[in-house]
Image (tube, rainbow, N blue to C red):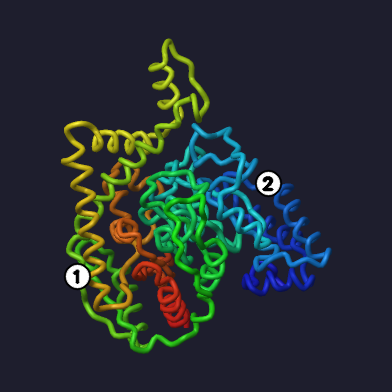
Amino acid sequence: MNVTELPIEDLCAAVRERELRAAQVAEAFLDAARRREAELHSFLRLEPEEVLADARRVDSVIASGEDPGPLAGLPVAVKDVIVTRGVPTTCGSRILEDYRPPYDATVVQRLKEAGAVVFGKTNCDEFAMGSSTENSAYGPTRNPWDASRVPGGSSGGSAACVAAGQAPIALGTDTGGSIRQPAAFCGVVGFKPTYGRVSRYGLVAFASSLDQIGPLARNVREAALLTRVIAGHDPRDSTSSRQPVENWLDRLDRDLDGLRVGVPKEWTGEGLDPEVRGAVEKASARLEALGCRLEEVSLPSSRYAIATYYIIAPAEASSNLARYDGVRYGPRREGEDLESMYLRTRSEGFGPEVKRRIMLGTYALSAGYYDAYFVKAAKVRRLVLQDFQRVFGTVDLLLGPTTPTPPFRLGEKTADPLAMYLSDVFTVTANLAGLPALSLPAGATEGGLPLGVQLVAPHFREGRLLQAAHGLEQELGS
């Protein structure tokens, strides 16, 4: 029995029934992680002693006759912007290189209560700002399919470790596509739930009105299983929703006959790679074969989505990252006076992309420009949401590409920030509107690189989204 290839539900059942020990599972994945870590650099921290100690605690619970929880012994890799008690959380930044949080994020707490084992902290773009995981202060992660290419970002380490079999599943975060875009680039499933569905308590903030935690998984079923564990109201997060969490697994195998699926014409036009377009066309045909009714729809405000996102997100980042000043957070760099101390601390602690976004955001919020930029962007954000609300009056789901291109080469876009930002042109709209969205594998290019397609649903319709994604996944994999 190859432990690392077992479906998650079978693995956890085997641990609960004492057919496998949690420590045995952890050792198998630690071995798998070691084999490719030097090549990929998926992790910023992976300490075997810590992982095995946590796994043995699960074994002790089982030996005492207690229920270890639904995720008994499951190793879960965690993106390094999600805090873990006593374990360094760096956000891929030098300014937090020595930070050890005194508490667990709600999602980490819920994983532990469900019997899961935190399996290292994964690499990411600094403070989750990037689309390639090249902005990490600790070096880039590489794509498991082709090490000369990026894994996507900012959750590139989480996507790469799942794709490479280093971990069975991982948590990432999605502010403008940072779960879905690396999922597409690495050939795995990436799921961003509705904003508010999963608590953000303990997520180091980039853009608070956009950030969301979700899984990167080998398949839709496993993504649904993990999300159900971490979802639900949290009184420590004021944006957390009280909407009840369904058992999404119960509806995955229902047929899709009569489901109305819209294909936004703005998502299939100029700038879309022909092979990505082919993947969307193939997915459309497979959905029709499953009984879905497809129709072209329009999201006219989506043409302004990137410009809107890159005003709102940097503005929120400017505010959120003000605390890293050498007084409250970050190693202090002494200066002649307070201002020079701030300057040295932040200049040496932050990387180029974080500095760029702080400056953009500060400018958009400054006197004389606030109305012209931030207020206008907030109004356009409302138009983006209204477009989705109008379209969801006639269709149940939307289908489109996750990314405009297949995975690009390391260094290919680092000198052109706008080209890098356009990697998220199809994903940022779901964040601006707070909608659930999922990327799933949809074949490969002629050169063998992964391709992904994206499904988007109305607020809190994760069940419908996961059901459609599961059905499409079965068809595309057949």
Cα separation between marks 2 and 1: 49 Å
Amino acid type assigned to the residue bearing label 2 in the image: Glu
- Taking the view exactly as shown, the residue that stands out farthest to the right is 64
* Label 2 packing within 10 angstroms: few (<14), some (14-19), many (20+): few
Q: Which residue: 40% across, 59% down?
A: 195
Q: Position of residue 475 (x, y in %)?
A: 44, 82
Q: Quadrant of residue 281?
A: bottom left
Q: Closer to the camera: disc 2 or disc 1?
A: 1
Whether tag 2 and tag 1 are in contact, CB under 8 A, the answer is no
Q: Position of residue 79 (x, y in %)?
A: 53, 50
Q: Which residue is mark 2?
A: 47
Q: In what element is the residue under mark 2?
A: loop
Amino acid type assigned to the residue bearing label 1 in the image: Ser
Relative to 21, is 322 above or below? above
Q: Which residue is mark 1?
A: 298
Query: With 42 as the anchor, is 173 left or right in this view?
Result: left
- Is 391 in front, or is 261? 391
Q: Which residue: 27% across, 82% down?
A: 294
- Is 98 in front, or is 321? 321
- Which sits earlier in the primary sequence, circle 2 or circle 1? 2
